Amino acid sequence: MSRLPVTVYFIPIIVGAGICVYISIPCAVVLIVASLVILGIHAVEMLLRKKCVLEICKEIDSILMDAERFRISDYSESELSLLEAEINKMTIKLREQNAKINENHILLKESMEDISHQLRTPLTSMMLLVDMLHDPQLGNSERRQYINEIGQLNDHMKWLIETLLSLSRLEAGAVTFNKEHISSSELVRNTVERFMISAEVKGVEMIMETEGEPYIDCDIRQTSEAIGNLLKNCIEHTDVGGTIKIYCYDNAIYSGIEISDTGCGFTEEEIPHVFERFYRNGEREKSGFGIGLAYSRKVIVSQNGSIQAKNKAPHGALFDIRFYKTII
């Protein structure tokens, strides 16, 4: 209720009393007394409400000082009860947002540490190789070998930075997927060609099989990059003489792509964390999951797809990719 000057409340009393005097003096007296009683009750009510509002302000201040809960315990008025409920909702929401911000700060700190770790190793190796190149007694064959190693390390750092930027843009929702209708076997075949030389150098055979005529709607460039990261991971963890198999198939619900290798596979502890950014564990910490698998998952899931990491009998890793034909 808005505040009005006290004189405003007396104006209708005076006017009413003046009218009543012409009718009956006792009636005018009764009117004045009744009006003063009502004004007194209203004044007491306003004082109590002001006290309640001050208490609310104190409790809000206590929330700002990290009190656990807002409670108007001594008030039964319906308006204040509703206000308590709404402020409690607001408090819970603000605490959840604050916890999320703190979580993001911790994640950012850990991510920066991981990025530093990922870049420090190739940088240190490059610095050592550059120092070795200054040796005047270094032979031409060794010099070429060191230069090639520097080039490989530089390529690895370039890939790492580009993938990091792409993943950050994906997570920020700044990437638009330009979907096209394409045969999944054609998409996979074009991707596999980029890794044939790497596989041959390592002595790993790549086999591709297709069942039916599977088609998917996807961003060709982004999806090819995602599949390429999976192939890269398989090549890195498959021994000489091993095999990588890519199997494309189709059913009424989804079009699937399975990528499997004959490497060491995953431990039970690794499987729930395979697609986490910068996850490292055990033997794989030496080569690292890095961010490639995290990027692959984000691209696939963002296009109404799913991806799972499994172990394949008798040994090896398997990535099960599914692009669903309806929204799930």
Image: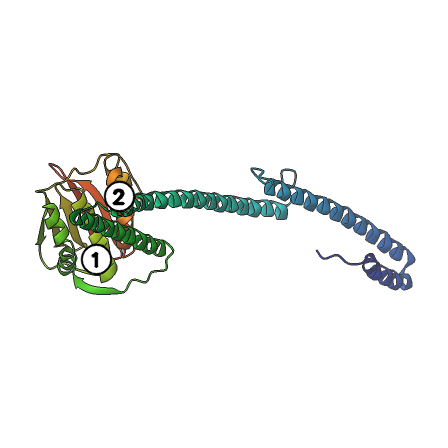
- Residue 38: percent from the left, percent from the top? 79, 51
Residue 270's image quarter? top left
Nearer to us in this view, 267 or 217: 267
Q: Is residue 258 above or below residue 184?
A: above
- Residue plotted at (57% across, 46% down): 87
- Residue 284: percent from the left, percent from the top? 24, 38
The quarter in which the N terminus is drawn is bottom right
Number of marks drawn: 2
| Callout 1 secondary element | helix
| Amino acid on which the number 1 mark rests in the picture | Ser
- Disc ID at residue 13: none
| Amino acid on which the number 2 mark rests in the picture | Phe
Residue at which label 1 appears:
224
Q: Earlier in the sequence, mark 2 or mark 1?
A: 1
| Callout 2 secondary element | loop
- Disc ID at residue 289: 2
Left/right of residue 144 with respect to residue 26 in the rendered view: left
Nearer to us in this view, 322 or 151: 151
- Residue 67: percent from the left, percent from the top? 58, 38
Q: Is residue 173 above or below residue 287?
A: below
